Image: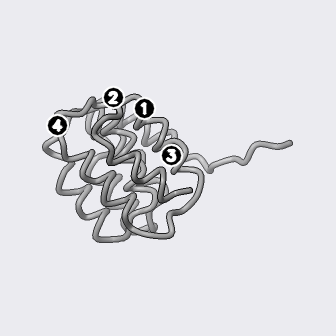
Amino acid sequence: MSELLTELLADASLTDWQKMWVLAALMQRRPFKDTSIKTSLRLLRDATHHDALRAIAAIYVGRFGDHARRKDLFAIYPSVSSYIQAAIYFSSRSWPPVERSNAKASWGAHGPLNTLLTTAMAKPIKKPSL
């Protein structure tokens, strides 16, 4: 199923909003292959796409990408809108502690949204009770 979703993510005939739904589905589990992460990174780098799609792609890459992909996010950060920057910073909540700390030190005070994210991410994640 994830292979089909990855193909849809790369399909040029889908709109950005449709690709956001595909990424939402892909976020439900860790990918078996790196293909969906590479495709998401391509979407993130492509300025012709809407910032909302690029932000979700950044969160996907940050959540499931390896160290090299997280370094790509650090490199991309200065060249994107503050909305996408906040998404990249938000994705750091799932990074290893040292990298998460570096992200906080580098980006935690970049504007009011990142300041709010810093406060929110300092709290432990609570699992919903059933």
How far is the residue under mark 1 from the one under mark 4?
A: 17 Å
**Residue 15: percent from left, percent from top:** 34, 30
Rendered residue at 52%/48% (across/down): 122
Q: Is residue 128 left or right of residue 40?
A: right
Q: Badge 2 local density, few (<14 within 10 Å), some, or many (20+)?
A: few
Q: Nearer the viewer, mark 3 or mark 4?
A: 4
Rendered residue at 28%/31% (across/down): 51
Question: Between 4 and 16, which is closer to the camera in this rendering?
Answer: 4
As shown in the figure, which amino acid type bears the numbered disc 1? Gln
- Could you tell me if the residues under marks 1 and 2 are in contact, i.e. CB atoms within 8 Å? no
**Residue 66: percent from left, percent from top:** 37, 69
Q: Badge 3 local density, few (<14 within 10 Å), some, or many (20+)?
A: some
Question: Between 87 and 124, which is closer to the camera in this rendering?
Answer: 87
- Could you tell me if the residues under marks 3 and 1 are in contact, i.e. CB atoms within 8 Å? no
Name the residue beneath numbered marker 1: 18
As shown in the figure, which amino acid type bears the numbered disc 4? Ala
Q: Nearer the viewer, mark 1 or mark 4?
A: 1
Q: Nearer the viewer, mark 3 or mark 1?
A: 1
Which image quarter holds the C terminus?
top right
As shown in the figure, which amino acid type bears the numbered disc 2? Pro
Earlier in the chain: of badge 3 and badge 4, it is 4
Q: On screen, 5 above or below 32?
A: above
Mark identifier at residue 47: 4
Name the residue beneath numbered marker 3: 121
Rendered residue at 23%/60% (across/down): 72
Name the residue beneath numbered marker 2: 112
